[in-house]
Each structure stands twice: as C-alpha cells, then as structure tokens.
Image: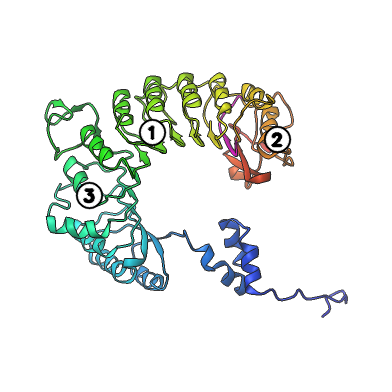
Amino acid sequence: MEDWDGESLVEAPELPLEVVVYILSFLRSSDRKEASLVCRKWYNASQDLQFQRNVTFSFPASASSLELIRGLGRRSRCRLSISQLDGFSMSRRLLQEVGACLGPKLESLALPGSSITEASLLALLPCLTSLRRLDLGGLDSLFMSGAFLSREEHRRQVRLALSGLEELDLSDLRYLSDLTFNRLTGCTPRLRRLSLAGCHIAFEFDPYRGCPVGAVEDSSALLSLRNLRRLLTELKLTLVALDLSRTSISPESLRSIAQVQGLVLEELCLHGCKELTDYSVEALVKHQPALQRLDISACTELTNRSVEAAAHGLRRLTHLSLSGDWRITEKGVAELLSVRTLKSLNLSECLHISGTEMIKGLNCSGAARAQLESLNLKSCIYVRDFAVLSFTRHLGGDAPRAGPDVLRQPDRPVGVLHRRSPSEACGSAARQVQGNHRLWAAGRGRSHQEQR
C-alpha cells in the first residue's frame, strides 16, 4: 500500500478483542466512551462485561423506554434510574415491564423527579428480590396521604423482597412521618446506609402537638428525633453511614444520636446543618471515634475547635469536607496533617486558607503526616502559586508539568492548574498527578489568558 507521496505504508496488525479490552481497562469511563467511537471492534471491546459491573442506566419514562428495559433483561445484573414517572398508564406499564423483565436482576432503583402512586410502587417492590439500593428521594406523592404500607399484607410482601436492602435514600421528603418511616424501615432489617437529607425532622419541639418531641408515640405528621434514635438502636449492628444534611439538627440532638449505645458509624454527612457548633462536633468525635468519612461543609458556625477535635479524635479519618466553613483558619487546618490516614481534604470556599501553615506541616521531616491523595482549594482566594506547586510536590512525589494556565508570579492568586475548555477556565479544575493523586484549585474571576 502506498500513500499519496508514493511512500509505502505498513498496516497495523489486527489486535485480538481481548487485547483491546485489556488496553481500554486503563482508561477512565469518559475516555473509554470516546475510544468506543473509533470503530466497531473498539465499540464491542468497550461493551465488555468487566466495564458494565456498576453501570446505572438512566432514562426518562417514555414509550421508547419499554424496548430498552426488555433489552436490559438479557443482563445478569442491572441498575436503573428512571425519571419523570407519573400516575398515568405509560408509567404504570413501564414499572410493570421493570418487574417482569428485571425483577430478580435489579440491584439498584432510583426514581428521581417522579410522582408515582402507592399502588404502582407496591406492585413493583415484591418483584425486586435482589434489590440492594432504593432511592425514594423527593417522592412526596407516596407519603402525602400517610397511608403508605398501612396494610399488613403489603408490609409482609415488601419485607420479603427488601430483606437484603443495604441502602435507602429518603432525602427531601416533606411528608415523611413516624408512622410511614417505621413501616418502611421495618421492611429493611439489614440496612447499612440511610439518607434523610433535607427531610423535615422535629429535633426539639413538635409544632403540631405543642409538646416536646418524644412525649407522643409515633406521630402521623412528622418524623421525630425519638423515632430516629429508636431505628438507630435497632440497626446498630449493621448501620455504618448516615446522612442528615440540610436538616435543622441541633447540637444536643447530634450529641444524642452519637451516644446511641453500640452504634459505630463510619460515614456521617452533615452538610448545611447551620445550627451545629464546636461543642456538637467535639461530642460527636468523642462518641464516634471510628468515623472514616465526615462532611461538615457549609456549617457556618464551626471554627478551628471543630477541626482540632477531628484531628485529635478521629485517627481513622480518610475523607473530610470543610467546604464553605468560612470561620476556619490556616492554624486549625494544619492540625489535620497529623492524621496519617487522611486521603481527601476539601477546603473549597474556606476564605482564610492560604496554604502557608499547611506546607510547613508537610515539610516537617520525621513527623507523622497525612498521605493526601486529593486536595480541593476551589475559591480559596489567598492561596498563591508557590503554595499550589508545593502541594503538587507532596501529593505526587514530583512536580507536575506546568500547563499554560499556571501562574508563575508568586505574589498573584492561584489560577487553574489545568484547563479543559475556555468555559471551565474560571471554575474548578483537576490535574492528574503521579500515583493518581489530585489537586483541585481555582481562581476567582478571570483566567490567566484573560488577565493578559
């Protein structure tokens, strides 16, 4: 074969499909998607079962989705996220197809942005005998009447199907009450992860009955702290992750939850709980020292005391988010570097962070220090270029190659380390560093190209 210049060309050897699959296994999912467009063989390689293990198929409810569901029935395991379901015939037929074609194969089901009826869901759940994750977040239509799972026959059928459920998402439910909460969680005896983010939980006072929470058994109007503690006590041997983000939890309420006898949490998310104080975090650390992941971002009343308490009391901590905690300063964050297990630290929008004290801590030879893999400094406007370069040396072992958007002047604010498109230059960006370590940084305002 010759090209247009008359020079001979050597054709590349045809690689076996197994070799192409092996090559694609080193790519991220987004890059593997792009590689699948090269040719039919690469597409077939990208569809190998090893790449489909944790894939969730997301699609809106429509007539065309019926054929997709039937096609997914050929898989041994499947995860679904179906949006825009309602109470009309098309949605009911779609859920019937899910139960008939994917029932014992479905591992995860989410129904975001939907408004389905109780009858439709109760007809589907008994078919899902292998379900491990159920997301009912925002489905107010199920709980508005207060009659969800009120019949013992329905509870028995759902209990048999959900006996192996490990993760339950009940976030953003406006009408969740003690009665409906007890009926549903009573069908999930092996629950490991529970999300109540954004739910209306009465932690101190029952506004409907005019008495302290706990004085009345099983409220039909709201979810109470007393009832939540009861569930945590029952699931103390299995539950390891709890999400109470965007709730009105008070310091005393958090202390009460942390003190549940026998409860050992590994993950706790308290994002946006604005009433929490340093006292509540100190109590949490004292009673739950096994925490590995803690999110106390956007808790605007927290100061360095909370950070120091986490650094001294959580010796297994691997992931910590302090995003938006504007009262936290450099001195408090420096204490975290003594936690050897810490791998991920989110300091985005912490306005008083400059990185100076953190770098000093990382440079201390012989002292125990964190082995950070990911550091988020988005919108930390006082972080300078020399600090970013110092962080990359510690994160990746060697300083990465500087891209065109790295600001060289040590007296100017940090810019984006890696820019993928002009629209992303002013936002957060990530540079992949040796050993899969990452540093997230962002400037506020114009990019370096625009500043010039």
Residue at label 1?
A: 270
The earlier-in-sequence mark between 2 and 1 is 1
Query: What element does badge 1 sit on?
Result: loop
**Residue 39 visible in the shown view:** no
Left-right relation of 411 to 35: right
Residue 272 locus on image (x, y percent): 39, 32
Extent of the magenta region: 372-382
Please name the amino acid that badge 1 sits on: Leu
User: Looking at the image, do the residues carrying marks 2 and 1 touch, with CB atoms under 8 Å apart?
Assistant: no
Extreme right residue here? Answer: 6
**Closer to us: 282 or 290:** 290
Please name the amino acid that badge 2 sits on: Arg
Residue 100 vertical position relative to residue 360 in the rendered view, above or below: below
Residue 153 vertical position relative to residue 49 in the rendered view, above or below: above
Locate the N terminus and report the quarter of the image it occupies.
Answer: bottom right
Residue 63 locus on image (x, y percent): 33, 69
Please name the amino acid that badge 3 sits on: Leu
Residue at x 30% of width, y 32% of height: 261
**Residue 383 image-quadrant placement:** top right
Residue at label 2?
A: 393
Residue 282 vertical position relative to residue 159 in the rendered view, above or below: above
Question: Could you say which disc has been placed on residue 102 in the image?
Answer: none
Residue 356 locus on image (x, y percent): 64, 22
Q: CA distance from mark 3 to mark 2?
A: 50 Å
Query: What element does badge 2 sit on?
Result: helix
Q: CA distance from mark 2 to mark 1?
A: 32 Å
